[in-house]
Every structure is written in structure tokens, then in C-alpha cells.
Image: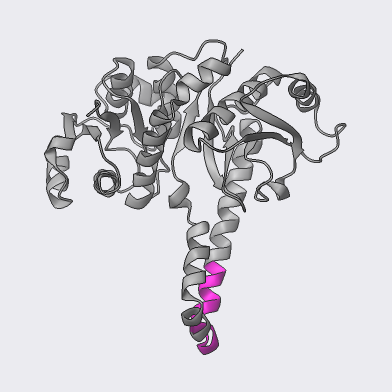
Amino acid sequence: MKNPTIIAVDAMGGENSPNKTIEGISLHTKVSTNIKYKIYGNKNIILDLISKYKISKEKIDIIHTEKQIEDTDSALSAAKKGRDTSLWLAIESLKNNETDAMVSAGNTGALFVIAKLNLKMIENIDKPALSALWPNKNGMNVVLDLGANVECNEKNLIDFSIMGSALLKALFENETAKVAILNIGSEEFKGNNIIKNTYQKLSQAKNSLYEFHGYIEGNQIMDGNINVIVTDGFTGNVALKTAEGTANFITSELKIAMSTTLLGKISSLINFKNIKKFKQKLDPRLYNGAILLGLDKPVIKSHGSTDAVGFANSLKVCEKIIKGHLIDKIKENIN
């Protein structure tokens, strides 16, 4: 048997941790093989949870620390807390080649800063980008940047196109990466100068990793004709929060409609399977696990408020990008 994949886990980051992180590991062990977890956090608390969720001790290695970064810490103060925190130690294990990927549900700003302090950028990439998966009618989208960079230039957006396409291929080997720039219209003359210049450069570039399909508007993101959507971090984060809010509104209203009247209750029973499938399609936990692209090691950010199911999915993302050789794919295609 080949050597196991080792995932570093910041057990203390995020809401309801370390309970949800350890339960998430438990869920992940049931669907994955040849994975080990290097867990950083309070050993006494973690050991009790390992017993509670019946996780084999052969699969884990616990590195004790009582220091942790809080969600209320600024990125600067988090970095000053230093090397003994669970987040820092987990990232440092990547730097020292002790682990293959790391995941945290903790403070996003702290994660970015500490990751950049410890890890190198891939050569010829100027800025990292935060990327995540969104569902569409035909499968999944890769969308980036989702907030790491408020302002981007043409080179950044071109780099994002390559990194996003590499991520798609790492996760879904048989998919063809179809790249488009998020814009206010589909016509070539629309958008600011950076977007228009990026359009021209991507139109002229030749890269076997992806196909360039021009612009995409916000109301087309879920259509499924494009699967790699590129934008600056400000626009991407607004789009992400809008999509999350819309999904929550729809599921909430559906629940009310199906539970407040007798006819609604009968309808929900008759259509139980279809409603369940619909709710799963909009369940953000099943798409949890944003990837900080551009660093020379895989760093995954789980949503801080997700539960064990969501955290288990972020571990699944770790596993897939390691097995899909994400970093190698980026290095092979970046200019």
C-alpha cells in the first residue's frame, strides 16, 4: 500500500470547535481510505471527542497546544500570537513537509496572513486567490477570487484563470475547463479597462488547460455553460454572499410554504424525495471548502459556521486536490 495522505487539521478554529472538527473527521473516515489526520489543539479535549466519535487512534496524531486564534482577533494580532497556536502549527507542518494539505474553519484573515508568512508563492504568481465550488445546472463551477484581493490587474485575472482551471481538472478529471470573466454585460466593450484588457489577452492566449468563453453575467452563473468564473475579490465576495443569501431565502420560504397549511404538508409528503433532492442542491455544507490558490502547498478554508457535515466535505476537498495533483497542474501551466 502506498503512503497515506496526511491532512493537517486546526481543530480549534471556528464555531463549536473542536467538537465539529473531530466529528467531521469521524464522518470523513467512513467514506475515505488511506488518510491520516494530524490534529492540532487541546489534546485532553480532543482525546475525549476521539473516543466519543469512535475514531481509530491509528488514523490520528494529536499535537497539543492550548493556544488558539479567536475569530475576533485581527490578522496582525493573530500573527503576533505566534508559533504555538493551533492554526500556525498546522500551516507550519505543511512548510516542513510533514503533511500534504491543511484545513481550518478559523479566522480567515489570520489564515491568509499566517499561510503567506510560512509558505512560498508558486513561481510567477503575484497574488493568491480564494476559490470555491458553486453548483450549476450541469455540475459544479469553480469561482475565484472570493475575497483575498479587493483589487486585481490583468495578470492576476489571467493567473486566476489558470489556477481555477487547474482546480477544476484536479477535482473533476474528465471535465473541460471553460473560463469566463464575470462582467456587467456580454459585449466586448463593456466593463472597466482591466476587464477589457484581460479579455483581449485571454482571447489571444493559447493554453491547453482551458477554453476561454469571454464574459459571463451574474444571472448566468448557474446555467452550467461555463465552469470557471474569474473576477476580483471584491466582486466575487459580493456575488458569493448574494448567492448564499438567496439560497437561504429560498429554502426558508419553501419550508414555510410546506409546513404552515394542511395542503402544504400533504404536498411535502407526496413530493418528499424531490424536495429532499432540491434542498441538497442548495445545501452549502455540501460545497464547503474554499481553496487558497497560488501558494506552493494546499490550504483549505472551511466556513467558520458550518457543522460536522460541512467540515467533512472540506476534508474531502483536501483529499481530492492532493490526489488530483493540483499544485503540479498550476506549476505546469503558469507563465
* Residue 256 sits inside the magenta stretch: yes
**Of 127 and 330, which appears nearest the observer?**
330
Q: Residue furthest right?
A: 189
- Is 108 within the magenta? no
Q: Percent position (x, y) of residue 180? A: 70, 35
> Along the horizontal axis of the image, is 257 left or right of 96?
right
Q: Is residue 329 above or below residue 139?
A: above
Residue 125 position by quadrant: top right
Image quadrant in which you'd find residue 311 = top left
| Left or right of 101 on screen, residue 200 | right
* Residue beneath the point at 78% across and 20% down: 204
Residue 320: x %, y % from top left: 40, 35
Q: Name the colour scheme.
A: one colour
Which residue sits at x=85%, y=32%? 188
Start and end of the magenta stretch? 252-265
Q: Quadrant of residue 184?
A: top right
Assign the magenta stretch its main secondary structure: helix
Q: Position of residue 201 (x, y in %)?
A: 76, 20
The residue under the point 52% across, 57% down is 281
Identify which residue, 47 or 270, lies in the foreground.
Answer: 270
Q: Is residue 252 left or right of residue 53?
A: right
What percent of the width, then of the height, locates residue 197? 79, 22
Picture quarter with the N terminus: top left
Residue 74 in sight here: no
Q: Is residue 106 left or right of residue 206?
A: left
Q: Nearer the viewer, residue 108 or 159?
A: 159
Residue found at x 34% / y 36%: 70
Instruction: For residue 34, say whether it is visible.
Output: yes
Number of marks in the image?
0
